[in-house]
Amino acid sequence: MNHGRRDTPHTPDDQGTAADSHTALRLEAVRKVYRLGDDDVVALHHADLRVGADEIVALVGPSGSGKTTLCSIAGAILSPTAGRVVVGEQDITEFGESELSRVRRESVGFVFQAVNLVPFLTARENLLVIDELGSRNRSAARARADQLLDELGLADRASNLPSQLSGGQRQRVAIGRALMNEPSLVLFDEPTSALDTQLGEKVMELIRHEMKARGTAAVIVTHDERMTHYADRVVHITDGVLAA
Amino acid sequence: MRLALQEMRRRPGRFVTATAILTLIALLLLFLGGLLDGLIGSATSAISGQTGDVITFSSTSQSSLPSSRVGGAVRSEIAGVPGVERVGGLGVTQVGARVPGRSERDLVDVALFGYELPPAGLGVPPDRAKAYADTSLRAKGVAAGGTILLGPARTPITIAGFVDGLRYGGQGTLWASPETWRVVQAANRPDAASAVDVFQAFVVRGDGSVRAAELARRIDDATRGSTSSRTTAAAADAQPGVEQQRSTFNQIIGATVGVAIVVVALFFALLIVERTALYGVLKAIGARSRTLFGGVVTQAIVVSLLASAIGALLALVAALTVPAGSIPFSLSPARVLGTVALLVLAAILGCSFSLRRVLRIDPASAIGTAS
Ligand SMILES: Nc1ncnc2c1ncn2[C@@H]1O[C@H](COP(=O)(O)OP(=O)(O)OP(=O)(O)O)[C@@H](O)[C@H]1O
Ligand SMILES: [Mg+2]
């Protein structure tokens, strides 16, 4: 468990070499092939991507182009068929199931395309789940959950169940959950797709604010070109091939 | 684990069915267990209530009191065995008793014991022609200070007081001095009458230096096989019919526990199928399989504890409403605790069939677009 980072969240080069501390994510020649019955579906061809330590990268591409696949590999949820994946200072390419689980618990945050909150927990409890799965520091986690909910404008919705929240509020709870473990990298899979343009822009603004305030790196998937100006850099993906 | 408990609190409805079924199973288990304990208690508690460590019968008796005879020679052999502290004679005669207030033909079956070492709940034997009565005889009209007439000879015995939980062969018991017992036996069962130093068994108290089983072995060695000695508990179990009763009931209890395991297994298998998406998400945000399965086990334990508690309460109410003496039912704390432990074990075993299912859930299942 990485208590060091928890205590000093904004230290620019806590542990690791100088070169690594400027990189939140590195994908090298990553390839992902899904087996579908007897067919092979190549979702990622040869992806090379480097995301700086506090950089926000927008990943833009049409449906089925491999955006979710790339995020999932970067988020230690999927293993690549070939290539190398480095998250922060850890080369996770060869990691087994339990090590990948630890990376998800400690190093990355993930906002799913389909929000995916725990339906029987309140907004606040959905954030606290992260603590229960991980380091178990109840009082620190409570303080952090309250602070996040406040920043996300959900202070008065803390004790509502997901079913009692609007789509945008749910999206914000999911963002809060992704930030609970103080990750060095957060992956947002279409955080605005379910929202109208106005609300989408507010959420993007919020994401940018939260990332920049913490110096956290992010990959934001979107197929909406209008959202890309919230990112530092835009990477396009088409049929599993990346292009700047 | 917290998550599992939160789910139970927020969605109690999901667990009602399983809890209800397990409550019925707990009730059934307690009923069967209480009946078994009641039956065995009413057959043998006069023996298991002896305060000695070992009971010595004659070797040909198969540990049955009526057919056992042990005399003064055996007594001195036992007394000489290292580790033996005290030896007390025990004799019994089963007769019909005429109880005041009951009709002349309405005899109450009793077992009159003559004892030297007092069993649990009793002091030294009462005076001549007096006896302590087992409390189960109260329901038959036996009262303290009253006199009842034993056997065809109508030997009068005055009740000196009551003692709880000493029954023999399904009958209430009377506890008297060896002399009183011999008088009753000689008057009513002249064929069985025995010499002054002859008893049916000896209750042997050890000095604590050896274990009871070892003491029993030493005694039988010392008498060169003319006796058959058992620990007090084993002697009670060796009474005719006890073993069969116990094994029959335990088979039914075992089958019931089997049903409980299947119920829990099915219930949690279904619950986990329903939760596949949720577990996928939790794994994707870093939950270990072990944490998730721990939650399942926690829920199974809570459900079984809840069911046991309600079941025990219902069984207790049932035990209190059943009129005394109508059925031999005895609900001991040990039986209740044992049943709870059995049910919790069944719950853990039952939900562990779902372990593989939990392990197999892929965190990648969370990344789809389906909500
Ligand atoms: N589990 C899977 N099994 C087989 N093929 C898959 C699987 N998941 C994704 N694919 C395929 O891989 C390709 C990339 O899918 P991916 O989900 O990464 O696309 P996406 O860019 O996120 O699309 P969208 O914008 O619709 O979410 C698609 O052709 C898809 O059909
Ligand atoms: Mg997608």
Image: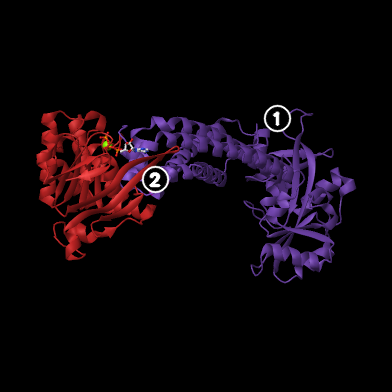
Chain colours: A red, B purple
Q: CA distance from mark 1 to mark 2?
A: 68 Å
Secondary structure state at the residue bearing disc 1: loop
Quarter of the rendered image showing ligand 1: top left
Image x and y of residue B27, in percent: 55, 34
Image x and y of residue A3, in percent: 24, 59
Q: Are marks 1 and 2 on the same chain?
A: yes
Chain of the residue displaying label 2: B
- Can you tell which of label 1 and label 2 is closer to the viewer? 2
Give the quadrant of residue B111. top right
Q: Measuring 72% from the left and 72% from the top, which residue is drawn there?
A: B82
Vertical relation: A28 (above or below) B158: below
Give the quadrant of residue A219. top left
Image x and y of residue A141, in percent: 22, 50
Give the quadrant of residue B102. top right
Which residues lie in the magenta part? B291-295
Which residue is labeled 1 in the image?
A: B101
Callout 1, which amino acid? Gly
B212 left or right of A204?
right
Chain of the residue displaying label 1: B
The mark nearer the N terminus, 1 or 2, is 1
B250 is within the stretch colored magenta: no
Count neighbours of disc 2 (C-alpha within 10 A) and say few if under 14, some if 14 to 19, many if 20 or more.
Answer: many
Q: Measuring 79% from the left and 50% from the top, which residue is drawn there?
A: B65
In this orientation, which residue lies closer to the viewer: A33 or B346? Answer: A33
Q: Do the CB atoms of the residues marked 1 and 2 lie less than 8 Å apart?
A: no
- Our reading of the magenta stretch's main secondary structure is helix
In this orientation, which residue lies closer to the viewer: B66 or A140? Answer: A140
A88 left or right of A55?
right
Callout 2, which amino acid? Leu
B293 is within the stretch colored magenta: yes
On residue B292, the disc is: 2
On residue B117, the disc is: none
